[in-house]
Amino acid sequence: MVYLARLAFVVIAFALAVLAWQSFNRPPAPPPPPPQISTEKLGELVMLRLHYANILEFFQKRAQDIPMTPWELRLGGTKILMVVRGDCEISTNLRAARYEQVQPGSKTLHVVLPAPRMLQPRVSHAAREAGGSYFYTVTDEGLQFFIPSNAHQVAAVNNGWAAAEKDIGKYCASPQWVAEAKKNAEQVLAPMFQAAGWTATFVWQ
């Protein structure tokens, strides 16, 4: 019995020694990539806010269709000269970001991001004294001048605002501003990965 007990002790000691040797010689587990949730929680990351100011001329024509023909009889219209002020934002949707080419050994990875996009352009309807937009002149031409129509002028004003908003969108969608938004996004995101010990290369789609 004493011999068996000694034998069991030797076997257990040997097994523990093997486990200890394996634990000390086992290569360390590679570090996981930084959690993507850290960018997903940011959602829409606004990287650029642009302010817009311009003087626009808008013409709302007034015409009468000629029956049975593809032509129309132009009766005049309403011309509006607008001083337009507004703004827009260019953002990156970080919910759509993903990781590629993750290298745990060198702690490098590619962060694939959707191209920056413009959020809703806005025309400022604040008071003129507060820096808002306003109409400089509203004039009628042709028969519209002799038979003025309040409904036509209202339509001209509303369509003028829509044209101004479209012009703001065109200004903000310039490749120059998109490139600057990308640069700003990388400057914001790169330190987040560096703080976790990773080097990120940004790929824009």
Image (cartoon, rainbow, N blue to C red):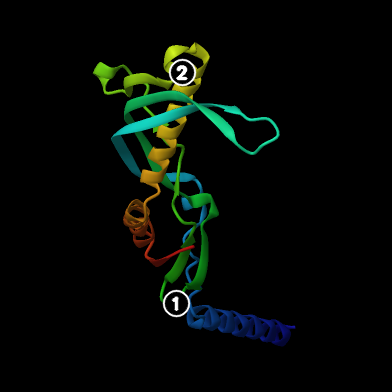
**Residue shown at 33%/33% (left/top)?**
56
Q: Is residue 34 visible?
A: yes
Which numbered dot is residue 46? none
Label 1, on which residue?
A: 105
SS for dot 1: loop
Q: Tell me which amino acid carries mark 1.
A: Gly
Q: Nearer the viewer, residue 201 or 142?
A: 142
Contact between marks 1 and 2 (CB within 8 A): the answer is: no
Residue 66 lies, with reference to residue 3, above or below; the image says: above
Q: Tell me which amino acid carries mark 2.
A: Gln
**Residue shown at 70%/81% (left/top)?**
5
Q: Position of residue 129 (x, y in %)?
A: 24, 17
Where, quadrant-wise, is the N terminus in this rendering?
bottom right
**Residue shown at 45%/41% (left/top)?**
119
How much space separates mark 1 and mark 2, taking CA atoms?
75 Å
Label whose residue precedes the other's in the sequence (1 or 2): 1
SS for dot 2: helix
Q: Position of residue 117 (x, y in %)?
A: 46, 49
Q: Nearer the viewer, residue 113 or 165?
A: 165
Residue 31 lies, with reference to residue 83, above or below; the image says: below
Q: Position of residue 95 (x, y in %)?
A: 53, 50
Q: Nearer the viewer, residue 31 or 128?
A: 128
Residue 15 lies, with reference to residue 159, above or below; the image says: below
Q: Is residue 42 visible?
A: no
How many other residues sit within 10 Å of disc 2, few (<14), some (14-19) or many (≥20)? some
Which numbered dot is residue 144? 2
Residue 80 lies, with reference to residue 33, above or below; the image says: above
**Residue shown at 29%/34% (left/top)?**
54
Left or right for 76, reference 129: right
